[in-house]
Image (spheres, rainbow, N blue to C red):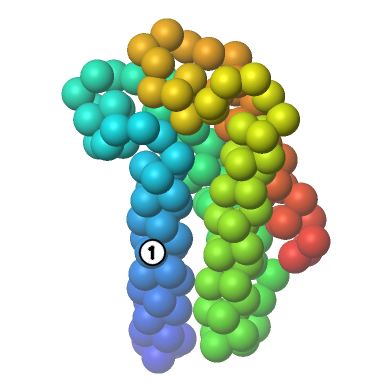
C-alpha cells in the first residue's frame, strides 16, 4: 500500500512538472502575441484583454492535460508522453487559431489585446482556445 502511494506521488510530481512546463510555454506564447510585456499588461496595467487571453490558454491547457492523464492512467510512461504531446498540440493549435483570427479580421489582434478597454475580439480568441482544448480532449477520450 505504501509502495502504491509513493508511485502515485511520483506520478503526480511527473505530471505536475509537465503541467507547469506547458503553462509556462503557454504564457510565453501569449507574451509573444501581445505587444509589450504580458507581465506588465496584466499585473501592472490590469489589462482585461491580456488577462482573458492568458486565462483561456491556461484553462485550455488544463483541460487537455487532465484528459490526457485520465485517458492513460494505466501506463505512466505512455501517459507522460501522451500528456506532453497533446499539451504541445493544444498550444500549437491555440497559437494557430490566434494567427488565423488575426489574419481574417481587421486590424491587429495583438494591438487590440493590449488595449486597456475590453475588446470583443478577445472573447473570440479566448473562446477558440477553450473550443480547441475541448476538441482535443474529445479526441483523446
Depicted 49 relative to depicted 95: above or below: above
Residue at the image position 53 percent from the left and 36 percent from the top: 56
Depicted 110 relative to depicted 87: above or below: above
Q: Quadrant of residue 41?
A: top left
Depicted 132 relative to depicted 115: above or below: below
Across the whole image, how many numbered discs are drawn on residues? 1
Left or right: where 2 falls relative to 67: left
Q: Residue furthest left?
A: 44
Q: Residue furthest top?
A: 117
Q: Is residue 93 visible?
A: yes
Depicted 26 relative to depicted 14: above or below: above
> Front-most of 26 and 130?
26
Residue at the image position 24 percent from the left and 19 percent from the top: 45
Q: Quadrant of residue 69?
A: bottom right
User: Which residue, given by chain and number where applicable, does mark 1 sit on?
Assistant: 21
Q: Quadrant of the N terminus?
A: bottom left
Q: Secondary structure at mark 1?
A: helix
Residue at the image position 72 percent from the left and 30 percent from the top: 104
Q: Quadrant of the C terminus?
A: bottom right
Q: Position of residue 80 (x, y in %)?
A: 53, 79
> Front-most of 3 and 18?
18
Q: Position of residue 33 (x, y in %)?
A: 45, 40
Q: Position of residue 9 (x, y in %)?
A: 38, 76
Residue at the image position 41 percent from the left and 34 percent from the top: 34
> Front-most of 93 and 18?
93
Q: Position of residue 25 (x, y in %)?
A: 41, 57
Left or right: where 138 falls relative to 96: right
Q: Is residue 16 visible?
A: no
Task: Give the class, few, some or many, for how many residues have Cα within 10 Å of label 1's Cα (few <14, many ≥20).
Answer: some
Amino acid at each position: 500500500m505504501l509502495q502504491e502511494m509513493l508511485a502515485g506521488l511520483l506520478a503526480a510530481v511527473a505530471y505536475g512538472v509537465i503541467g507547469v512546463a506547458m503553462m509556462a510555454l503557454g504564457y510565453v506564447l501569449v507574451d509573444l502575441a501581445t505587444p509589450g510585456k504580458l507581465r506588465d499588461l496584466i499585473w501592472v496595467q490590469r489589462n482585461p484583454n491580456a488577462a482573458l487571453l492568458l486565462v483561456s490558454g491556461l484553462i485550455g491547457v488544463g483541460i487537455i492535460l487532465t484528459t490526457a492523464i485520465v485517458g492513460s492512467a494505466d501506463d505512466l510512461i505512455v501517459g507522460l508522453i501522451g500528456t506532453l504531446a497533446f499539451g504541445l498540440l493544444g498550444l500549437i493549435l491555440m497559437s494557430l487559431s490566434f494567427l488565423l483570427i488575426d489574419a481574417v479580421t481587421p486590424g491587429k489582434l495583438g494591438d487590440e489585446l493590449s488595449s486597456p478597454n475590453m475588446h470583443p475580439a478577445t472573447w473570440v480568441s479566448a473562446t477558440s482556445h477553450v473550443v480547441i482544448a475541448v476538441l482535443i480532449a474529445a479526441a483523446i477520450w
